[in-house]
Image (spheres, rainbow, N blue to C red):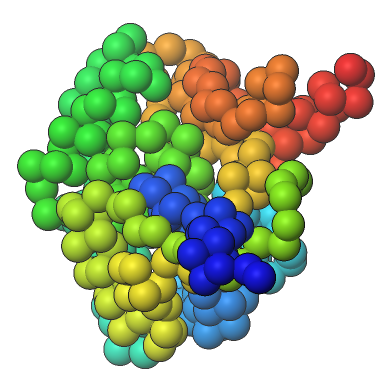
Amino acid sequence: MTSKFFELHMATQNTERRVVTNRVFLLGLDELYRAAMKKHERTELLQSAKEVSSALSLPPANVPIEGYYGEDAQLTEYFRIVRALQQVRKERESEVAKLQSFKRLKQITSSPIFGPTSETPYLFSAGKDPLTVALENTLPDDWSLENLTQLAFDRALESDDFSLVGLAALAKDALVLTALRESAVLYAMAAAGCGVPREPEYVWQVDDVITKRATRFVKTLNELLGENLPQPGLKSAQIYWNASDESKVGGRCVRIGFDDRTDPVRQYHWAIDWDAYCRPIVTEFWDTKIWTTDEFRAKLVERMNRR
């Protein structure tokens, strides 16, 4: 006859612990953010951008399509219009100031979920997240993954920044920082075991400072978009675990700075590559062109096909 102690022991042995770490949580938050943001960018925000650009007689910008904005025609159109609007100077604000569509775009682009904004001569500001501050306060000759990841962490820790990139900076994880910066590019500057496993146990191991600021990020995002992303914490650990997937961030590439002391201008990138064991790693590189996620992923596929 099986004892209750034996049954309890087996149940414990068969329980799968799913630990939500900083990386798991932030990649999960990023995936939920992207899904929510893309829904609005394809619809109401695209319509708003069209109305404002029409009032200004402004054609879409002919620029590389960065981030996830190459996924479909609507996102690409939105990206090109917003990039064009970001080059319009404040002197033209009187032409669109009364438009609800303009007010909505201003609300989005100036939201703290993209970092604090600063005074610029342009109609729309860009978020100044900790990575941007690190880049601005460091000579391009000193830009490196290790240095900028540390500087962005220091900046995030000393501030109360709760932007998407700010949260990534607090994790002091270059892979997370690259992945989440790529998401905000438009607005920021197999198992083996014995027996059948029982219901997994979810463990929340996210740093307190990230949890607290992410709570503000989620609250602000939900209010901004009318969404219902779950509040960070143990109760929502399963949702963030399920949304987190390192395999999805492979190939993300983001231009985070440039050096205009040279001609042509050199562009500084971070990208998520794969090592020889198909583990995600972050690589940094300079080029005179802006590399997009689509282009970098195509390069990865080509390289893997040659193996």
Q: Is residue 65 visible?
A: no
Question: Residue drawn 65% across and 49% down?
Answer: 248
- Residue 86 position within the rendered picture, expressed as x and y whole percent measured from the top left: 40, 57
The image quadrant that residue 169 belongs to is top left
187 up-or-down from 39: above or below = above
Residue occupying the far front of the picture: 1
**Is residue 181 left or right of 276 when viewed as pictured?**
left
Residue located 22% across and 28% down the image: 151
Q: Residue at x 82, y 22 (%)?
A: 303
Q: Which quarter of the rendering shows the N terminus?
A: bottom right
Res. 287 in view:
yes
Would you identify the image quadrant in which residue 154 lies? top left
Looking at the image, residue 157 lies above or below residue 276: below
Residue 301 screen position, x and y as percent:
82, 32
Q: Position of residue 139 (x, y in %)?
A: 26, 16
* Left-right relation of 41 to 151: right
Residue situated in front as seen by the camera: 103 or 251: 251
Q: Is residue 59 left or right of residue 92?
A: right
| Residue at the spot 29% in from the left edge and 19% down from the top edge | 147
- Between 296 and 75, the one lying in front of the other is 296
| 102 or 158, nearer to the observer | 158
Considering every residue shown, the one lying at the far left of the view is 158
* Quadrant of image for the C terminus: top right
Q: Position of residue 193 (x, y in %)?
A: 71, 47
